[in-house]
Amino acid sequence: MFDKFLQEFQRRRWDQVLTRLPEKRIDVARVKEFYSNLYDPEDRNPKFSRVRGQVVRFDAETINDFVDTPVILADREEYPAYSQYLRTPPDHDAILSALCTLGGQFVLNVDGAP
């Protein structure tokens, strides 16, 4: 599995995107600042955070620009496939049949949802 991931990572040349960062390293303090400023109780879009007083967007378009991967939409599609997946209520029976052993069931949470 990792080999497939690595091949795709290199095919898209993401290794080149990440290694052209200044001094080829990540500033851990800035990463922590990004995540600590990320919380939005209303879960609005587009997503953003503040780092050193600058607004950092991280929607699909911004991330795809960074890794040089265009978003490709089919005719009459408004969202990419993954966004459509997230907006679709899950089919718990299909998940159950794919993941659980024969006769297995979901454990319900405190709200009674699987």
Image (cartoon, helix red, strand yellow):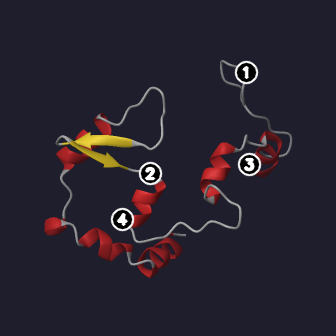
Report the number of numbered marks.
Answer: 4
Q: Amino acid at mark 1?
A: Gly
Measure the C-alpha gap from mark 3 to mark 1: 20 Å
Measure the C-alpha gap from mark 2 to mark 4: 11 Å
For the residues labelled 2 and 1, say whether their Cβ atoms are less than 8 Å apart: no
Query: Which callout, 2 or 4, points at the residue further toward the start of the chain?
Result: 2
Q: Residue at label 1?
A: 112
Residue 22 lies in quadrant: bottom left
Query: Which callout, 3 or 1, points at the residue further toward the start of the chain?
Result: 3
Measure the C-alpha gap from mark 2 to mark 3: 30 Å
Q: Residue 3 at what x, y percent from top left?
A: 49, 75
Q: Amino acid at mark 4?
A: Phe
Identity of the residue furthest to the right in this view? 103
Query: Which callout, 2 or 1, points at the residue further toward the start of the chain?
Result: 2
Residue 79 lies in quadrant: bottom right
Q: Residues within 10 Å of mark 1 (few under 14, many from 20)?
A: few
Q: Residues within 10 Å of mark 3 (few under 14, many from 20)?
A: few
Disc sitting over residue 59 in the figure: 2
In this rendering, the label closer to the viewer, 1 or 4: 4
Q: Amino acid at mark 3?
A: Leu
Query: Which callout, 4 or 3, points at the residue further toward the start of the chain?
Result: 4
Q: Is residue 99 above or below residue 37?
A: below
Q: Residue at label 4?
A: 66
Q: Residue 4 at what x, y percent from top left?
A: 53, 75
Q: Residue 112 at what x, y percent from top left?
A: 73, 21
Placement of the C terminus among the 4 image quadrants:
top right
Q: Residue at label 3?
A: 99
